[in-house]
Amino acid sequence: MTMTITVNDSIADKVMAFLNTFPKEAVKIEQSRPWYADEVKSRIEEYKSGKMETVPHNEMWKQIERQIEA
């Protein structure tokens, strides 16, 4: 039997964990998320946790201007 199930991103990890409890030959999973979805998710989590290094907007432009002038 073939089914299409749409899962909200907020519970996707829980659904995947549940599906992974079945034998590998019992369930075939084809994710329709774009290739970059996991990368975006990890960067959002990194930003929210405060671990992501950031540069204030005005400082970024100062750095760009210095590089152009060099």
Image (cartoon, rainbow, N blue to C red):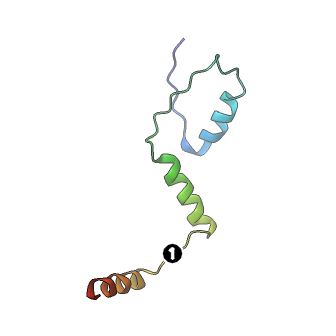
Q: Quadrant of the C terminus?
A: bottom left
Quadrant position of residue 64: bottom left
- Picture coordinates of residue 53 (x, y %)? 55, 73
| Residue 9, quarter of picture | top right
Q: Quadrant of the N terminus?
A: top right
Q: Seen from this angle, which residue lies furthest top?
A: 1
Work out whether 32 lies above or below 70.
Answer: above
Residue at 63 percent across and 66 percent down: it is 49
Q: Position of residue 33 (x, y in %)?
A: 46, 39
* Residue 62 x %, y %: 36, 87
Residue bearing mark 1:
54
Query: Relative to 17, does residue 62 appear above or below in the rendering?
Result: below
**Figure label count:** 1
Disc 1 secondary structure class: loop
Foreground pick, 33 / 63: 63
Q: Position of residue 20 (x, y in %)?
A: 68, 29
Amino acid tagged 1: Thr
